[in-house]
C-alpha cells in the first residue's frame, strides 16, 4: 500500500481533557506514525446529546501506508490504554475518542469503519480544526474543499479555539 495522508479527529470531555489529547498524540506517534500537522485545540459543546461536559477537539495528520483495519485496531488500543471503556453506538461522555476522518482519497464502507467519516460535513467541531490545517483538502465523495464544506455546514454549535501553554 502506498503512503497516504491519514487525518484523525481527537476528542475528550472527561478528566484532564488537554492531557488526554496530548497523551493520545504521543501514543499515535509511537504506534501509527509520526504526526505531520496538528490543529489548535477547540472547545465545543457535545454534539448529538446533552452533557454538562464540554469537549476539547483537535485534528492531526500522519503519513501512513498501514492498512485501515490495522489503524482502527491501533486506535482502539490507544483509546483503551487511555481509559476508554468499550464502544457505544450512542453518544456519551468519554475520556478519549479518536475518529478516522480521511485516509487520502480512500472511500471505504464496512460495518466497523467508514472512510471518509460519514458525518464530517455535519459537524463544525470536525470541520473547524480540519479547515485550519487542510482548508484545500478535497472530500473524495462530495468533491468539495474542507473550507467549502465548513461554509455550507448547518451546524450552529459554537466551536472556540482555546489558548494552550
Image (cartoon, rainbow, N blue to C red):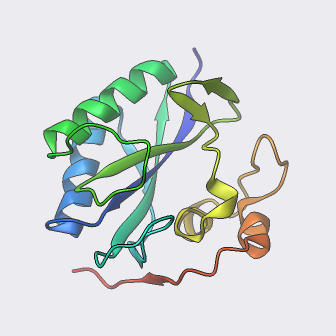
Position of the N terminus by quadrant: top right
Quarter location, residue 147 = bottom right
Residue 58 sits above or below residue 40 on the image: above
Residue drawn at x 35%, y 70% is 55
Name the side, left or right, on which 113 lies relative to 92. right
- Could you tell me residue 76's position as x and y percent? 30, 33
- Could you tell me residue 16's position as x and y percent? 15, 68
Name the side, left or right, on which 150 lies relative to 89. right
Position of the C terminus by quadrant: bottom left
Of 112 and 25, the residue lying toward us: 112
Residue drawn at x 28%, y 67% is 13
Residue drawn at x 38%, y 72% is 41
Q: Is residue 40 visible to us here?
A: yes
Q: Is residue 66 visible to us here?
A: no
Of 63 and 127, the residue lying toward us: 127
Residue drawn at x 56%, y 63% is 133
Amino acid at each position: 500500500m502506498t503512503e497516504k495522508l491519514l487525518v484523525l479527529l481527537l476528542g475528550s470531555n472527561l478528566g484532564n481533557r488537554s492531557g488526554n489529547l496530548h497523551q493520545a498524540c504521543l501514543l499515535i506517534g509511537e504506534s501509527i506514525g509520526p504526526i505531520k500537522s496538528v490543529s489548535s485545540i477547540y472547545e465545543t459543546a457535545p454534539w448529538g446529546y446533552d452533557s454538562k461536559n464540554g469537549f476539547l477537539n483537535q485534528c492531526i495528520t500522519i503519513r501512513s501506508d498501514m492498512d485501515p483495519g490495522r489503524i482502527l485496531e491501533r486506535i482502539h488500543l490507544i483509546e483503551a490504554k487511555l481509559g476508554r471503556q468499550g464502544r457505544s453506538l450512542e453518544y456519551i461522555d468519554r475520556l478519549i475518542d479518536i475518529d478516522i476522518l480521511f485516509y487520502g482519497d480512500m472511500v471505504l464502507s464496512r460495518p466497523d469503519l467508514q472512510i471518509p467519516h460519514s458525518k464530517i460535513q455535519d459537524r463544525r467541531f470536525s470541520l473547524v480544526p480540519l479547515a485550519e490545517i487542510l482548508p484545500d483538502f478535497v472530500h473524495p465523495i462530495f468533491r468539495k474543499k474542507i473550507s467549502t464544506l465548513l461554509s455550507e455546514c448547518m451546524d450552529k454549535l459554537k466551536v472556540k479555539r482555546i489558548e494552550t501553554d
